[in-house]
Image (cartoon, rainbow, N blue to C red):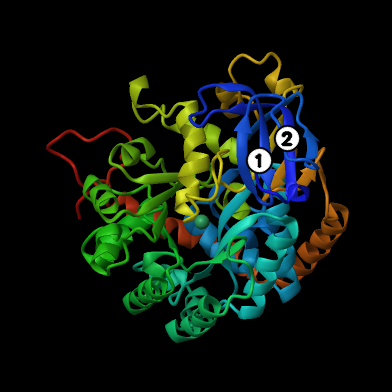
Amino acid sequence: MPEHSEAHQIIRGGTVFDQNFRNADPADILVGGDVIVEIGRPGMEAPAGAKDIDASGRLLMPGLVNAHTHGHGSLGKGLGDKWSLELLLNASPWVSGGFELEDKYTAALLNAAEMVLKGCTSAYDMYFEFPAPSMEGLDAVGRAYEEVGVRVVLAPMMADTTFYKAIPGLIDALPQPHRARVEKMSAATCEEHLSVCEIFLESWPLDRDRVRPALGPTIPLHCSDAFIRACRDLANAHEVGVQMHLAESKVQAVAGLQRYGKTLAAHLDDLGLLGPRFTGAHCIWLDDDDLARMADRGATVAHNPGSNLRLGSGIAPAKRMMAKGIGVGIGSDGSASADNQNMFEAMRMASFVSRIVTPDPDDWIGTQDVLKMATTGSASVLGLGDLVGRIAPGYKADILFLDLGNVNFVPLNDAANQVVNCEDSSAVDSVMIGGRMVLSGRRFTSFDFEALRQRVNEASARIRARNRDSFVHMQAMARFVSQHCVGLVRDHYHVQRRLDPPPEDESSISS
Ligand SMILES: [Zn+2]
């Protein structure tokens, strides 16, 4: 037993999941500082002076880990409806442009607060600043996460090519004056991005256990080869992660074949980007060779079923990825594309969409597996696999207290099935992160949510007013963007949705 008992807390009276989410049984948890020291029988001894935390009537589980989100998107929830990914990208200057420094901080606070309220304790955030990341912006976002208490891997989301130039033929398909307008648009250069990233990775001032830097070149078609190679080298030199949206829409898959003469994953592999530091977000339009590439290189996947349904992007073959040995975590994606930060909903969708991929229940993703994906699976995506995602000695004390009196758990028949299939985050009563109660009785302990609400409403009104021109242009161009992109994939009907496991003799998409 460590001697400094004043730093100990003992969580008593709770029901605790085992490591595989098979059973949930009464147990006490001893926390020392920010880590779990011991899990023992009810009434176990604790060091003298340890603080008692009452968890009676509570189901204790590891904090959920969000493998893919966008903090800047929190102010954009509910802005779109029938948007494909390409219509969302067309709307991006309206949704995510015009943020001042304070707005970046506010958006990150809101994203973090929503995650805590819905049981998430760590996240991988690809945060976008227009036109390029800034140290002030990254610092503000990092501080916002620290203030709320959520652990974050913070990756500036970057592109050195505009969306309109990334999609083959799109600019030519736009009538004037839209064509001239988007021809004049330019993204920040590779050098502009890299100069900030070098400082970001070298001299990040915050505690890396709480806010860990990473890189987020956003989409292969939006990033030049030179830029992708530079991100690869920088990530290797500083031993940080790289996250990228990969084959999220069929438009991207087809455009990749046209641009590179190979699949997007093959392109990234040839650039040397695929490796254990790399996470592909979405990965819907990967063929079997691509899955083998990802598995061979030790790359991971962030599976975002809610966003994929909302944007009509398709369904990622998550079960097949796991069968091939790829580490798969679950993400909510940003609220501008999936409208919330609810990892319980994301888990349920991940489980449910696996069932329309194949009629064989043996190949579905069950509730125990989906719980592992959203905890240990996502933790390895964040590069925190030995720190978070389990209630086990040596792991960070990131623990959810779910109220078993909530109607979602009445009656309590099967804890794992009910966490995934019944819970909607309304039973999240308290949240401990790193041994600190961040949320207690559904109230933030050291953070004023009312003040945030007011701040968000003011920021949102200001940004919408400032971006009025972008709104007008977005609306005027939407029809042309959509028609062109729909036409692009319609002409390539042979790029199949991989809803069924392929027959042996037909295992890859081809150009
Ligand atoms: Zn995303």
Residue corresponding to mark 2: 11
Residue 399, numbered circle: 1
Point out residue 419 in the picture as x, y percentages from the top left corner. 61, 28
Which of the two labelled residues, at mark 1 and mark 2, occupies the earlier sequence position? Answer: 2
Q: Give the left or right position of residue 297, taking residue 90 as reference.
A: left
Point out residue 324 in the picture as x, y percentages from the top left corner. 28, 41
Image height check: is 160 above or below 17?
below
Q: Secondary structure at mark 1?
A: strand
Q: Secondary structure at mark 2?
A: strand
The 10 Å Cα crowd at callout 1, few under 14, some 14 to 19, many 20 or more, is many
Residue in the image at 58% along x and 53% along y: 123
| Quadrant (top left, top right, bottom left, bottom right) of the C terminus | bottom left
Image height check: is 456 above or below 290?
below
Residue in the image at 69% along x and 51% along y: 33
Q: Amino acid at mark 2?
A: Ile
Residue in the image at 54% along x and 43% along y: 389
Q: Nearer the viewer, mark 1 or mark 2?
A: 2
Say whether residue 508 is visible: yes
Point out residue 196 in the picture as x, y percentages from the top left corner. 53, 82
Image height check: is 308 above or below 144?
above
| Quadrant (top left, top right, bottom left, bottom right) of the N terminus | top right
Residue in front for this viewpoint, 38 or 443 = 38
Quarter of the image for residue 288 reads top left
The 10 Å Cα crowd at callout 2, few under 14, some 14 to 19, many 20 or more, is many
Q: Amino acid at mark 1?
A: Ile
Q: Give the left or right position of residue 164, taking residue 307 as reference.
A: left
Residue in the image at 73% along x and 69% along y: 103
Point out residue 281 in the picture as x, y percentages from the top left corner. 44, 53
Residue 231, numbered circle: none
Quarter of the image for residue 56 reads top right
Discs 1, 2 touching: Cβ within 8 Å:
yes
Is the CB atom of the residue marked by disc 1 within 8 angstroms of ligand 1's nearest atom? no
